[in-house]
């Protein structure tokens, strides 16, 4: 059985802890690989490699950094099919979705290629007589990233390309469920000419996570995952003196007003709720239907959902793949049966879904719940699966109060033809990312990604300008230089003026 090892100091390093985790093919349910789990000593070895590399990388020219990143971008583009195949094999998402993930990660690599413009700094001259003040940004040192299973390539690329462009060195701890994509990203970075130790990958479980959070030589930690773990990462990391950005979970609402284009809203609800099998923090999991909108909208959603093709991610005919593990699949299914017991109408029940020839896969069909109320578990919890709830309200004001009462504030959307209503919504809703007739408003690479409330712990969003600021710290330099007229040799004709 193939073993996924660590990447430390510019080369593969076999695990020595003796602990391993299974890596499954979600479509078949079979374990196809194992991944080495790092001990605290192995994490320390990666940090020491990164610390040594920082001595030269941290003072390297912007030209050298960007030359490596431009080459890296070329290699990622050339290998995007291979990376997507690794994602599909371990995560289960369909190939087109995996390719889209790689493309969105490439956006941040492209942003990192433009780092000289982002690090220009500021200069004020003559703030006082012969005094100038410059504001500059400098790298932090060794930084780390802890990433989730649902985007094995994209989320790591949200972090380390920008961090190393800013002059830091990086230790990445990917999800132990999907380790191969991160390992490939490190291999390609080395091929692009990234010096040994600038990017390191250590696989593992909570032992590795805690070793990162407690290590005295790690200056900052980035995290994407569930809200309980994000809170733990932030609390533990900051207690150990680190800068932390921890992006948590979500319960994203899509508000549909009576004047909305219902065909567009139904298409968007399908895409946003069931894409990637609902395993994404920007998935729409609640449709808030105002007035008489609910019945026709649910009819259109059901009509489309019944036609979705579910199957292995490597089958070009598949539109949705399996869930990551059997345990997670069973948990997602429990919300459907639980919602029925709590009074919701189960319009579509996907809990018993199987795929012929792949009966042991982690399958879950799409599910649609109507008449969901805020007291139900299906509404209160982040399900992280292909389950869409519909909440009925009478007015816009009732809808905005419902949405703003949520403990999460990651992403949200409104569907309407009314520009005034849309503008009011974008100002009033308590969420970090808002879509107007756009169901998944993930910002492009040069804007920052992040939510509000329990969807973000820390002061910085990820990538964009916030990412640059997170991976650097400001310094202000005040300078006075003597003027030649103040004295010294002067061979000119003496003057009394």
Image (cartoon, rainbow, N blue to C red):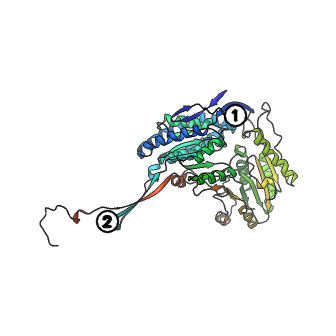
Task: Indicate the quadrant where residue 25 lies.
Answer: top right
Q: Which residue is mark 1?
A: 22
Q: Residue at x 60, y 47 (%)?
A: 213
Numbered mark located on residue 359 in the image? none
**In percent of the image, x 31 and y 65: which residue is there?**
130
Give percent across and percent down for residue 420: 66, 66
Q: Earlier in the sequence, mark 2 or mark 1?
A: 1
State which quarter of the image contains the N terminus: top right
The tag on residue 130 is 2
Callout 2 environment at 10 Å: few (<14), some (14 to 19), or many (20+)? few
Counting from the top left corner in percent of width and height, residue 109 is at 52, 44
Q: Secondary structure at mark 2?
A: loop
The reply to whether residue 144 is visible in this rendering is yes
Query: Which residue is at the front of the view, 228 or 240?
Result: 240
In whole angstroms, how far apart are the C-alphas of marks 2 and 1? 65 Å
| Whether residue 442 is visible | no
Taking 38 as reference, is 338 left or right?
A: right
Placement of the C terminus among the 4 image quadrants: bottom left
Q: Position of residue 485 (x, y in %)?
A: 22, 65
Instruction: Identify which residue, 359 or 173, lies in the foreground.
Output: 173
Mark 1 lies on a secondary structure that is strand
């Amino acid at each position: 059985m193939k073993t996924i090892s660590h990447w430390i100091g510019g080369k593969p390093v076999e695990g020595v802890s003796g602990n391993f985790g299974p890596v499954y093919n979600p479509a078949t349910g079979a374990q196809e690989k194992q991944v080495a789990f790092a001990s605290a000593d192995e994490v320390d070895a990666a940090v020491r490699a990164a610390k040594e590399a920082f001595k030269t990388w941290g003072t390297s020219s912007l030209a050298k950094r960007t030359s490596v990143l431009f080459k890296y971008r070329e290699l990622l583009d050339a290998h995007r099919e291979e990376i997507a195949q690794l994602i599909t094999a371990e995560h289960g998402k369909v190939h087109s979705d995996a390719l889209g993930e790689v493309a969105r990660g490439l956006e941040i690599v492209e942003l990192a290629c433009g780092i000289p413009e982002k690090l220009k700094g500021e200069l004020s001259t003559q703030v006082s007589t012969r005094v100038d003040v410059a504001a500059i940004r400098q790298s932090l040192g060794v930084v780390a990233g802890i990433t989730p299973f649902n985007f094995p390539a994209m989320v790591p690329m949200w972090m380390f390309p920008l961090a190393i462009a800013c002059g830091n060195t990086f230790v990445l701890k990917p999800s132990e469920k999907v380790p191969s994509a991160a390992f490939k990203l490190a291999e390609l970075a080395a091929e692009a000419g990234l010096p040994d130790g600038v990017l390191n990958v250590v696989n593992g479980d909570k032992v590795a996570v805690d070793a990162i959070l407690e290590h005295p030589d790690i200056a900052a930690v980035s995290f994407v995952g569930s809200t309980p773990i994000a809170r733990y990462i932030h609390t533990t990391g900051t207690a150990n003196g680190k800068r932390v950005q921890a992006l948590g979970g979500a319960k994203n609402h899509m508000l549909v007003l009576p004047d909305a284009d219902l065909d567009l809203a139904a298409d968007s609800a399908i895409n946003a709720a069931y894409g990637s099998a609902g395993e994404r923090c920007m998935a729409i999991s609640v449709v808030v239907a105002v007035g008489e909108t609910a019945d026709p909208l649910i009819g259109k959603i059901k009509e489309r959902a019944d036609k979705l093709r579910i199957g292995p991610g490597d089958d070009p005919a598949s539109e949705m793949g399996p869930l990551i593990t059997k345990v997670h699949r069973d948990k997602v299914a429990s919300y459907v049966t639980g919602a029925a017991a709590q009074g919701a109408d189960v319009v579509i029940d996907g809990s018993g879904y199987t795929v012929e020839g792949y009966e042991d896969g982690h399958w879950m069909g799409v599910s649609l719940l109507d008449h969901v109320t805020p007291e139900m578990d299906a509404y209160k919890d982040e399900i992280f699966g292909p389950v869409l709830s519909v909440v009925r309200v009478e007015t816009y004001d009732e809808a905005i109060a419902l949405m703003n009462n949520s403990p999460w504030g990651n992403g949200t959307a409104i569907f309407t033809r009314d520009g005034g209503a849309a503008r009011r919504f974008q100002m009033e809703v308590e969420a970090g990312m808002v879509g107007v007739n756009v169901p998944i408003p993930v910002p492009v690479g040069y804007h920052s990604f992040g939510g509000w409330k329990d969807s973000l712990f820390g002061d910085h969003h990820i990538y964009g300008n916030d990412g640059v600021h997170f991976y650097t710290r400001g310094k202000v330099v005040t300078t006075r230089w003597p003027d030649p007229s103040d004295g010294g040799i002067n061979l000119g004709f003496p003057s009394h003026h």
